[in-house]
Structures are given as C-alpha cells and as structure tokens.
Image (tube, rainbow, N blue to C red):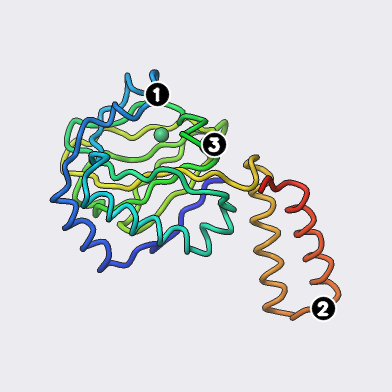
Amino acid sequence: MIICIGEVLSRTEIAEIVGAAEKIRFVDGGSTAGWAARTVKANLQAAADDPTALALEARIRRRLEAHPVVALAARPRRFGPLLLSRYEAGRGYGRHVDDAIMGEMRSDLSFTLFLSDPAGYEGGELVVESPAGEQAFKLEPGHLVLYPSTTLHRVETVTRGVRLAAVGWIQSLVREPDRRELLFELDTARRRLFDEQGKGEVFDLVDKSFRNLLRMWAEP
Ligand code: NI
C-alpha cells in the first residue's frame, strides 16, 4: 500500500522550514547510501552536525510521530533517521532499494515529505515501482507519501529549480505490507462503524477481530 497524507505541515510551518533551510550546510548525499545505491545517488543532504538541520528534523519528526493517519497506516514501532534532502538542477537519485537495516532498526516504510512548491521545479518526481507499473509522486508542500521500503524507487533528475524534501524511515510493529494494509482498512472500518452505530454487537465482533489480528501479527 502506498498512501499520500495531506497537510502534515501547515503553510506557515512550511514557509518557516524552507526559510530556515537556506542556512543549512548541504553535503553530497552519497555518504549515507549503501554501496550500490551510492552509484546512482546524486542529491545533497543536510550535514549531520548542522544545528539548523537538526532542529528542523526534530520538529518534523514530532509532527509525524503525532500524526493519526501515519499511526494507522504505519503502526510505528520506531522512527529512524530523518534527513533533509536538496536536489538542484542536474541532481537525481536513480533506481535503488533502501537499506533493510539502519543502525538499530529495520526499515519497513519509507516516506518523503515534500517541502518545495511543485511549480518551482521541474522533474524531481518520486517514482515507485510495483508489478502493476510505476507510480510518480510530486506533491504539494507539506504533503507526505508513505510507501513500503521493500520497493524499487527513484527520484527523477531535477531539470530546473530546487526540490527540498524530508525523507525518513519507520520500523513498523507489523513487518509485512499486506498485513499492515489489512489492519489499516479493518481499523478504519471499525472506527467508522463506531461513529455511525456506536458500540453494538457488530462493532464488538469487528473490534475483537481487529485486536486479535494485531495481537497475532505485531512484534512489539
Ligand atoms: Ni530510497
């Protein structure tokens, strides 16, 4: 399941973050890629010790950790590194798969939070491959795409302007994407049933099924 989540950050927050990002020192992104991905990675990333970047990344992380749809879709066990990335004209990130293990965590979901106005740059789409074909994402600032880390994906070369984004990874309580999707849909239906009909017999059975599937599949 690939899910787009709108307005994770407000317009005001975006403006503040994009403004503050002007002060960040960006370095070659190849340093944090695996040995194969490094050969196709040509973006810039905030320097790991840049204080402005660290503050912005912490701010974005807090918003994601508190976001109800991220919680339902990802069932986070822990959030991994969050990186501010910058693509100027001529920069892209070719087809690759993200590292499975990042320090202490397993990457189950990857996300891109778009920060630049899409009218301000050309190219720069995040393209995710699946057996059904490719899907390209170029979202409004403040919007996020969450996708399984198991996929091959790339960022098309930017041909004009600058694309600023935050990228990161989540280890889920539920490792398998199809199980996460099933739980997401069943949980959504369960909540809607409660809103529409209250706590009746049907709700109780759906609620029991949901909780017991989560109990069966979760790795806390
Ligand atoms: Ni990637």
- Mark with earlier residue (1, 2): 1
Query: Disc 1 on helix, strand or loop?
Result: loop
Residue 212 x/y as whole percent: 80, 56
In screen coordinates, is 112 left or right of 22? right
Asked if the residue under mark 3 is in contact with the one under mark 2, i.e. CB atoms within 8 Å, the reply is no
Q: Residues within 10 Å of mark 3 (few under 14, many from 20)?
A: some
State how far apart marks 2 and 3 are (Cα): 39 Å
Type of residue at label 1?
Answer: Gly
What residue sits 18% from the left and 44% below the top? Answer: 162
Amino acid type assigned to the residue bearing label 2 in the image: Gly
Label 3 belongs to which residue?
106
Image: 67 above or below 219: below
Q: Quadrant of residue 40?
A: top left
Indicate if the residue with disc 3 has its beta carbon within 8 Å of ligand 1. no
Q: Which residue is mark 1?
A: 34
Local crowd size for mark 2, using a 10 Å CA cut-off: few (<14), some (14–19), many (≥20) = few
Which residue: 53% across, 40% down?
Answer: 148
Classify residue 79 as left or right of residue 14. right
The circle drawn on residue 200 is 2
Upstream in sequence: badge 2 or badge 3: 3
Residue in the image at 82% along x and 78% along y: 200
Give the distance between the C-alpha atoms of the residues marked 1 and 2, in whole angstroms. 51 Å
